[in-house]
Amino acid sequence: MSTFSIRYRFSLPNGKEHVFLLELQSETCVLVSSQATSSASAEASTRPNLPANAPANPPEWAALKFHQCKNCPLPAEATHCPSALQLSGVIDGFADVISYDNLQVTVETEERAISARLSAQQGLASLIGLIMATSGCPSTAVFRPMARFHLPFSSEVETAYRSASMYLIAQQFIVGDGGAPDLHMAGLERIYRGVHEVNRGMAQRLRAASRQDAIVNAVVQLDVLTNLVPATIEELLQEIRPAFEPLLAVVRKTRR
């Protein structure tokens, strides 16, 4: 099985460093394993993403019925929330971090490294969004294409551009399969509404699990973006339309 890795490196104000290494399956972008390492300890913990391979003692708040999302499509026999199992490793490293602590966060992929100094909740929102999309949760799996081409710390306009691009590429696949495309992106808003319910459920879980607010506020920040993008996507995309004018001119000529 071919995989690729994404590493998040958090440098905390107290001098500690937390590193999260995510291994993802290349074709499906499913999270194969996540490894958390702290500079305060030489030990690393690895958490497989499937409930069948869950840690020996998963936290109580990762149980599927604990603040289960209203729109959860997992079968009744499932015992744990896949996203919660993976996020439990993040919780362990950030119990004493406050939302607005300034951290140096570096994200390393096989192609490049991106580094920024930002608040703990901003850095964690990027990591948590990636984990939730790839963890095995059926509701957030729709964002696996964006996870495959992960852009950490993206702005509202960048997120709108990437979401629209992902959705319209999906329409191309639908056309190839003989279906009718949704070029007006009506279905994109429905997708974001579903993910909003997931974010709400996850925030409730994390409030019961974390002593500090950075983790919960990171999910809240993700949810703000989840609500903002579909509501303002047309306006956000209009901001970048001028850059498309040369391409539009060429496309129009080829249609004559």
Image: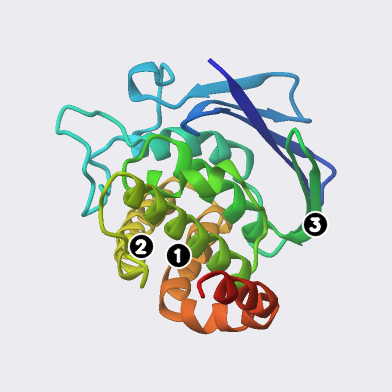
Q: Amino acid at mark 2?
A: His
Would you name the residue on which mark 2 appears?
196
Give the amino acid type for the residue marked by disc 1 in the picture: Asp
Q: Secondary structure at mark 3?
A: strand
Distance of mark 2 from mark 1, alpha carbons? 6 Å
186 up-or-down from 151: above or below: below
Q: Give the image quarter of residue 239.
A: bottom right
Q: Is residue 217 left or right of residue 21?
A: left
**Which amino acid type corresponds to the residue marked 3 in the rendered image?**
Ala
Pointer 3 local density, CA inside 10 Å: few below 14, some 14–19, many at least 20: few
Local crowd size for mark 1, using a 10 Å CA cut-off: few (<14), some (14–19), many (≥20): many
Mark seen at residue 53: none
Circle nearer the N terminus (2, 1): 2
Q: Residue at x 30, y 44 (%)?
A: 177
> In this figure, which residue is indicated by the disc labeled 3?
116
The residue at the point 69 percent across, 76 percent down is: 246
Q: Find the residue positioned furthest to the right.
A: 15
Identify which residue, 133 or 20, lies in the foreground: 133
Residue farthest along the left direction in this orientation: 76
In the picture of the structure, the residue carrying the numbered disc 1 is 223
User: Horizontal placement of 217 versus 240: left or right?
Assistant: left
| x, y percent for residue 227 | 42, 72
Residue at 57% in and 39% down: 90
Q: Secondary structure at mark 1?
A: helix
Q: Position of residue 72 (x, y in %)?
A: 23, 47
Residue reaching furthest to the front: 256
Check if mark 2's residue and mark 1's residue have beta carbons within 8 Å.
Answer: yes
